[in-house]
Image: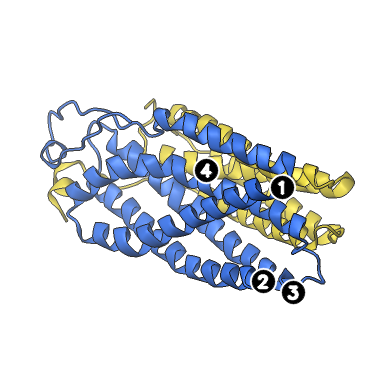
């Protein structure tokens, strides 16, 4: 990732706006790690290796749930109380990482999880876990809607706005609030995921 | 409002048609369709419900694209730049999901419907992201 500093002092000037380093919206240096993770998921599914599937599902799910809970319930409220320039500076460093981390852990979790459920027979209607899995599909469906329909577009739009010569502060504030509230909502929904998954695992 | 707002040209945002709403609704319908299909696996899912959801999603997505093309003075360069990279990312993600279904021996009409749902998924999310970004960009802005 580049050294992306949206300095409060710099961002506060109106005209002529000083040159600011561009924010790298997708951290290119992280992409090989993403490729490695995806290759491992493909291997796990193709080989139907129980350990590899479990690894992808648990690691992806643990990170997804943990990050959502931490960002939604801890980082989000802290961000909400920061000054706008401080939020902008934090977001310039934080949000590009989220752009590549979240889709990766979600894909690891869902793709391997579905295959694992098939392999263990949890998807068959006679399985005692069937209803819990359908409930988990519904929770994930709502989270996907919120994350992909609201949170991620707001995230990318904030980064593009901050890359402008003269960023619109009110717009950044509005888009960041959208990010903070939806992250909080997803964090709360992850509690339901924890309940469902621990129920499934303990049967 | 803060220093940033006061200092950085707080021009009013333009009004746009509900493109992001339509593409997000399309996404919602294919997510529901996906849940229906996945919840029946390995049995055959009721294809009528899934097909209806898919058709409704395609109509909404085409509606969003139609409205998009009718916007005068739009930051197309920014839209296309964000769209193509998001599309690449979501094609990879959709490809992973497709791989799971193919690996699990899904064939025929069910596979066709799931594939088309994934096409809507892989297209609607980039449309939402690119539109949300481009609506705030200046025309001709790269």
Mark 1: few/some/many CA within 10 Å (<14, 14-19, 20+): many
Question: Would residue B125 be visible to someone looking at this image?
Answer: yes
Q: Chain of mark 1?
A: B
**Is disc 3 placed on a helix, strand or loop?**
loop
Q: Chain of mark 3?
A: A
Residue A104 numbered tag: 4
Residue A159, percent from left and from top: 34, 39
Q: Is residue A22 above or below residue A131?
A: above
Mark in the foreground, 4 or 3: 3
Residue B117 numbered tag: 1
- Residue at 60% over, 44% down: B124
N-term mark: 4 or 3: 4
* Tag 3 near tag 1, CB within 8 Å: no
Q: CA distance from mark 2 to mark 4?
A: 24 Å
Instruction: Specify whether disc 2 shares its chain with disc 4.
Output: yes
**Is disc 2 placed on a helix, strand or loop?**
helix
Q: CA distance from mark 4 to mark 3?
A: 30 Å
Q: CA distance from mark 3 to mark 2?
A: 8 Å
Q: Is residue A25 left or right of residue A37?
A: left
- Residue at 13% over, 36% down: A10
- Residue at 20% over, 41% down: B9
Residue A128 numbered tag: 3
């Amino acid at each position: 990732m580049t050294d992306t500093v949206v300095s409060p002092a710099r961002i506060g000037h109106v005209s002529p706006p000083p040159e600011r380093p561009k924010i790298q919206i997708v951290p290119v240096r992280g992409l090989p790690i993403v490729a490695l993770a995806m290759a491992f998921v493909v291997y796990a599914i193709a080989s139907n290796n129980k350990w590899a599937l479990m690894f992808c599902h648990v690691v992806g799910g643990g990170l997804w749930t943990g990050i959502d809970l931490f960002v939604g319930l801890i980082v989000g409220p802290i961000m909400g109380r920061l000054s706008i320039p401080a939020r902008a500076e934090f977001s310039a460093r934080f949000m590009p990482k989220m752009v590549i981390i979240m889709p990766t852990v979600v894909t690891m979790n869902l793709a391997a999880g579905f295959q694992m459920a098939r392999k263990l027979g949890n998807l068959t209607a006679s399985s005692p876990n069937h209803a819990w899995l359908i409930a988990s599909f519904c929770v994930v469906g709502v989270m996907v809607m919120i994350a992909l329909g609201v949170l991620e577009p707001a995230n990318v739009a904030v980064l593009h706005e901050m890359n402008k010569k003269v960023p619109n502060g009110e717009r950044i504030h509005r888009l960041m609030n959208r990010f903070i509230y939806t992250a909080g909502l997803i964090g709360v929904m992850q509690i339901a995921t924890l309940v469902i998954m621990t129920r499934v695992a303990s049967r | 409002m803060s220093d940033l707002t006061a200092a950085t040209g707080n021009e009013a945002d333009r009004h746009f048609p509900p493109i992001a709403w339509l593409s997000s609704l399309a996404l919602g319908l294919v997510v529901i369709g996906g849940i229906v299909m996945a919840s029946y696996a390995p049995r055959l899912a009721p294809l009528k419900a899934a097909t209806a959801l898919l058709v409704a999603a395609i109509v909404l997505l085409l509606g969003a694209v139609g409205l998009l093309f009718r916007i005068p003075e739009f930051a197309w360069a920014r839209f296309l730049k964000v769209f193509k990279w998001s599309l690449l990312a979501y094609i990879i993600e959709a490809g992973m999901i497709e791989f799971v279904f193919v690996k699990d021996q899904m064939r025929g009409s069910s596979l066709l419907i799931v594939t088309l749902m994934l096409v809507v998924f892989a297209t609607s999310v980039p449309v939402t992201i690119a539109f949300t970004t481009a609506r705030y960009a200046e025309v001709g802005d790269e």
